[in-house]
Image: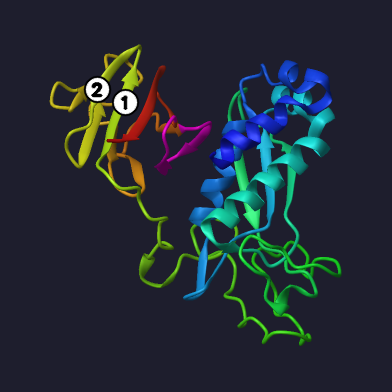
């Protein structure tokens, strides 16, 4: 069973159904959970062959209406999201430098249904002893400096040899957490299942198969899939299939929203929701 499915099942049993009522808002917990997974993937740093470090402190910014709906449950929701991140990290063999925490914050510039995820790495005093995959260090309070993203140099500790000195924060423009690995390389993706993967999108109930490596969406008749929407540019965005599949904005006027986040490039998973103009597109993929 997938990590996100387990997360949804845990939520169903909380507080005698109060979560089901409050989560009728635009932002769904599983969307936030998926965004946290992508935040780990996008900020993973490979230390060596056996250790890939990801952020452990996350801030989820919500619109005022969504924050007011979810804030009474922020403690329980934060704990469940942190558990989901821990499960995902174990699956991907990621390592944390300290305890995992997820906080909700209000952002006045976001509309209902939209959110942002920020992350940083806070090292606990004993995390330098080398936590295992998916396991945070234990011990003293976080050692992060005031406002510092990325982990600070750590003092010597007992046990296994210390981790190497951390790279400076701010490695990607406007980003939080780690810089990208040298040469722009991403961490190795999980092994793909045997068999051929099929890709398609669904727009207003219509299925469009993705048979080539790329698929351009836009208002122009030259686009691979034409979207008759005044808010969509002639060549709006491009989906590239692979492991993982991605979507790239092509300099559109109104941009793209992927799983609730405004972005210019994002990783796609089965069920990812893409909004261009006033049109919603569902990305799908399946083996066989």
Work out whether 82 lies above or below 137.
above
Which labelled disc corresponds to residue 208? 2
Q: Quadrant of residue 20?
A: top right
**What secondary structure is found at the residue carrying circle 2?**
strand
Which labelled disc corresponds to residue 201? 1
* 259 in magenta: yes
Q: Earlier in the sequence, mark 2 or mark 1?
A: 1
Residue 179 picture location, percent across and down: 51, 66
Which of the image's four quarters has the C terminus?
Answer: top left
Q: Is residue 152 left or right of residue 36?
A: right
* Residue 115 appears in the picture as rendered: no
**What secondary structure is found at the residue carrying circle 1?**
strand
Residue plotted at (82% across, 38% down): 75
Residue 138 picture location, percent across and down: 80, 67
How many marks are shown on the rendered structure?
Answer: 2
Q: Quadrant of residue 126?
A: bottom right
Q: Which residues are magenta?
A: 258-271
Residue 97 picture location, percent across and down: 68, 67
* 112 in magenta: no
Work out whether 103 lies above or below 140.
above
* Residue 259 appears in the picture as rendered: yes
Which of the image's four quarters has the N terminus?
Answer: top right
Residue plotted at (70% across, 74% down): 152
Q: Quadrant of residue 144?
A: bottom right
Residue plotted at (65% across, 44% down): 84
* In the foreground, 234 or 99: 99
Mark 2 surroundings: few (<14), some (14-19) or many (≥20) residues within 10 A = some
Residue farthest to the left, as pictured: 222
Residue 189 picture location, percent across and down: 40, 57
Q: Do the residues under discs 2 and 1 have CB atoms within 8 angstroms?
A: yes
Residue plotted at (80% across, 74% down): 125
Mark 1 surroundings: few (<14), some (14-19) or many (≥20) residues within 10 A = many
């Amino acid at each position: 069973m997938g990590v996100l499915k387990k997360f949804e099942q845990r939520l169903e049993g909380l507080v005698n159904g109060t979560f089901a009522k409050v989560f009728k808002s635009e932002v769904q917990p599983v969307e936030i959970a998926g965004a946290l997974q992508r935040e780990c993937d996008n900020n993973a740093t490979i230390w060596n062959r056996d250790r890939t470090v990801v952020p452990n402190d996350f801030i989820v910014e919500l619109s005022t209406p969504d924050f007011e709906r979810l804030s009474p449950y922020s403690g329980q929701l934060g704990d469940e999201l942190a558990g989901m991140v821990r499960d995902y990290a174990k699956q991907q063999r990621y390592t944390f430098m300290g305890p995992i925490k997820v906080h909700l914050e209000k952002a006045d510039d976001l509309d209902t249904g939209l959110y942002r995820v920020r992350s940083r790495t806070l090292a606990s005093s004993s995390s330098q002893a080398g936590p295992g995959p998916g396991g945070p260090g234990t011990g003293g309070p976080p050692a992060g400096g005031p406002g510092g993203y990325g982990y600070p140099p750590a003092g010597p500790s007992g046990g296994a040899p210390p981790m190497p000195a951390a790279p400076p924060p701010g490695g990607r423009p406007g980003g939080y957490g780690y810089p990208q690995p040298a040469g722009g390389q991403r961490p190795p993706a999980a092994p793909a299942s045997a068999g051929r993967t099929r890709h398609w999108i669904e727009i207003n109930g219509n299925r469009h198969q993705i048979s080539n490596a790329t698929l351009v969406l836009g208002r122009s008749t030259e686009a691979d899939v034409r979207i008759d929407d005044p808010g969509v540019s002639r060549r709006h965005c491009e989906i590239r299939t692979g492991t993982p599949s991605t979507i790239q904005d092509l300099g559109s006027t109104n941009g793209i929203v992927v799983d609730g986040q405004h972005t210019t490039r994002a990783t796609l998973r089965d069920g990812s929701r893409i909004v261009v103009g006033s049109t919603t597109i569902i990305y799908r993929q399946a083996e066989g």
